[in-house]
């Protein structure tokens, strides 16, 4: 089965003069990017050999792209990690994955140093990706060759033409972003834009919205993937009349796809943007399944994450856990564990499928309330929904073994009680009907 390098070569033969990679001050055609890839390959081969495990420093630098392509040409297993990691975190990941070498692009050259050892090999895999881990310690997920092509094929219907432009705004060390920013564009003939100094990856809540919108229009972005908070902020701007009247004015005339996921989405914000012509695609997935497994398309019911993609099947276990099937799935964790039984991956997430097959997410199994009606509920999910209101300062959810879930609401400022109650009633409709809520509005002691 072919990796990204072979697929990229096919694109080069089809579109050699098209722009493959662009930064604020330079662009590379597909032919030029191949030349840089072969230059890196020549440097790497005598140092890393073939089939070894190689740690890759990811800083959203444009030269990461030919580095990743060259390493794939050598059939290595790549272990990407962000430069933001502490030295201790890096060492732990490199040791856990068994990286024989560490590679980093430095200008037009590649720097290679030995890994901490002992070295391991992962036959049949081209990438080991690390999840954030709910307990704080990242888990190494060994993914099989071909899993990224399965996702890219399932997402092809979202692409309109070969002149698509993707502007990367997330850390490339995230596997989902690697598929969207590198694999999908370079195997389908699109243009990838990286401008990390101009548009730093969105990893915190501090970002200059007008600045980003200006440059997204300037680069001619046609599709993006962003965190849910960006969708919320964008909708707020639209509601305040600070942004354009439609998608073309807001994000540019060619823009047609705004993808989001990774955390609960704000239904109100998504509805606002869709009313202004911005097509919202909300996805659900995990590294163990090769990123997205379900995507909600424009026009489908808000509040769900859509139906499973063509290469995936979903079902809900008796305890409410979401199970995922369909090949390929992860091979193993680096510690030897494999959360797959009879072909079904246990996600650790709670959800429900509606009559149309669309998936709703209720939260995680680990931090649970179990109501007296035997419903498993993640308090953080409910807290996030009500915390999205500008009228709410703090939220706390309780109700284990009770018929109702109690939601303690601490209002922000001096919001009239009637206005606040109306807001809570509206937000309640975004939650599954199986959750019965009781509100406890706690007045400020000031």
Image (cartoon, rainbow, N blue to C red):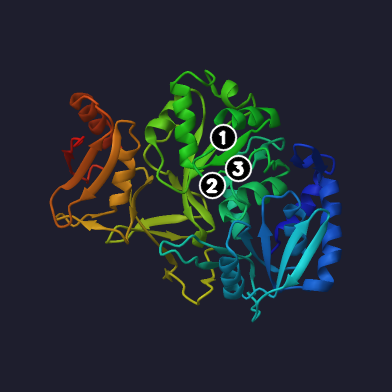
Picture quadrant of residue 198:
top right
Earlier-in-chain disc, 2 versus 1: 2
As displayed, is residue 406 above or below residue 249?
Answer: below
The residues tagged by marks 3 and 1 sit, at their Cα atoms, a distance apart of 14 Å
Quadrant position of residue 364: bottom left
Q: In the image shown, does 18 or 439 lie closer to the viewer? A: 439
Question: Is residue 324 shown above or below 158?
Answer: below
Q: In the rendered view, does 63 fall on the left or right side of 120? A: right
Q: Circle 1 sits on which residue?
A: 257
Q: From the viewer's perspective, is the residue at label 3 or at label 1 nearer?
A: 3
Mark 2 residue crowding within 10 angstroms, few (<14) / some (14–19) / many (20+)? few
User: Which one is in front, 128 or 125?
Assistant: 128
Residue labelled with disc 3: 169
Instruction: Evaluate if marks 3 and 1 touch, with contact meaning CB atoms under 8 Å apart.
Output: no
Q: Between marks 2 and 3, how big is the CA–CA gap? A: 9 Å
Q: How far separated are the C-alphas under marks 2 and 1? A: 21 Å
Task: Report the front residue among 71 and 198.
Answer: 198
Q: Can residue 298 be spotted in the picture?
A: no
Q: Nearer the viewer, mark 2 or mark 1?
A: 2
Q: Residue at x 33, y 33 (%)?
A: 389
Residue at image mark 2: 203
Circle 1: is it few (<14), some (14-19), or many (20+) Cα within 10 Å? many
Reading the chain from its start, which is encountered first: label 3 or label 1? 3
Judge from the rendering whether residue 283 lies leftward or rightward of residue 219; answer left or right: left
View extreme (front): residue: 446
Place of residue 83 in the rendered image (x, y in percent of width and height, measured from the top left): 63, 57
Give me the residue at 59% from left, 38% from top.
224
Label whose residue precedes the other's in the sequence (2 or 3): 3
- Measured as percent of width and height from the top left, residue 125 is found at 63, 69
User: Which numbered dot is residue 281?
Assistant: none
């Amino acid at each position: 089965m072919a990796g990204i390098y072979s697929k990229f070569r096919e694109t080069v033969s089809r579109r050699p003069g098209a722009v493959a990679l662009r930064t604020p001050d330079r662009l590379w055609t597909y032919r030029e990017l191949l030349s840089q890839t072969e230059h890196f390959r020549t440097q790497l081969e005598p140092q890393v050999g073939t089939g070894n495990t190689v740690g890759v420093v990811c800083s959203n630098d444009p030269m990461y792209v030919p580095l990743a392509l060259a390493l794939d040409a050598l059939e290595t297993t790549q272990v990407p990690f962000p430069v933001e990691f502490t030295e201790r975190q890096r060492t732990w990941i490199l040791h856990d994955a068994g990286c024989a070498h560490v590679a980093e692009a430095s200008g037009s050259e590649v720097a290679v140093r030995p890994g901490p050892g002992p070295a391991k090999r992962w036959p049949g895999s081209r990438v080991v990706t690390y999840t954030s881990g709910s307990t704080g310690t990242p888990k190494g997920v060994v993914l099989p060759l071909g899993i990224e092509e399965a996702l890219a094929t399932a997402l092809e219907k979202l692409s309109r033409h070969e002149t698509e432009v993707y502007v990367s705004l997330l850390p490339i060390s995230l596997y989902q972003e690697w598929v969207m920013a590198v694999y999908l564009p370079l195997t389908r003939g699109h243009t990838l834009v990286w401008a990390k100094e101009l548009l730093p990856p969105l990893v915190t809540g501090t970002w200059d919205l007008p600045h980003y919108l200006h440059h997204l229009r300037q680069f001619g972005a046609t599709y993006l993937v962003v965190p849910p908070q960006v969708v919320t902020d964008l909708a707020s701007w639209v509601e305040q009349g600070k942004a354009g009247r439609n998608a073309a004015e807001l994000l540019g005339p060619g823009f047609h796809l705004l993808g989001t996921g990774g955390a609960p989405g704000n239904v109100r914000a998504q509805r606002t943007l869709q009313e202004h012509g911005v097509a919202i695609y909300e996805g659900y997935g995990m590294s163990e399944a090769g990123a997205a497994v379900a995507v909600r398309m424009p026009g489908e019911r808000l509040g769900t994450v859509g139906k499973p993609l063509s290469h995936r099947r979903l079902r809900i276990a008796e305890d409410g856990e979401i199970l995922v099937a369909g090949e390929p799935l992860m091979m193993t964790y680096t510690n030897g564990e494999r959360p797959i039984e009879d072909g079904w991956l246990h996600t650790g997430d709670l959800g429900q499928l509606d009559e149309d097959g669309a998936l709703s997410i209720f939260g995680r199994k680990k931090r649970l309330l179990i109501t007296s009606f035997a419903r498993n509920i993640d308090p953080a999910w409910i807290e996030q929904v009500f915390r999205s209101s500008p009228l709410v300062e703090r939220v706390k959810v309780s109700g284990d073994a009770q018929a109702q879930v109690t939601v303690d609401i601490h209002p922000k400022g001096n919001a009239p009680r009637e206005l606040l109650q109306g807001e809570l009633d509206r937000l309640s409709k975004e939650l599954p009907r199986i959750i019965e809520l009781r509100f406890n509005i706690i007045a400020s002691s000031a």
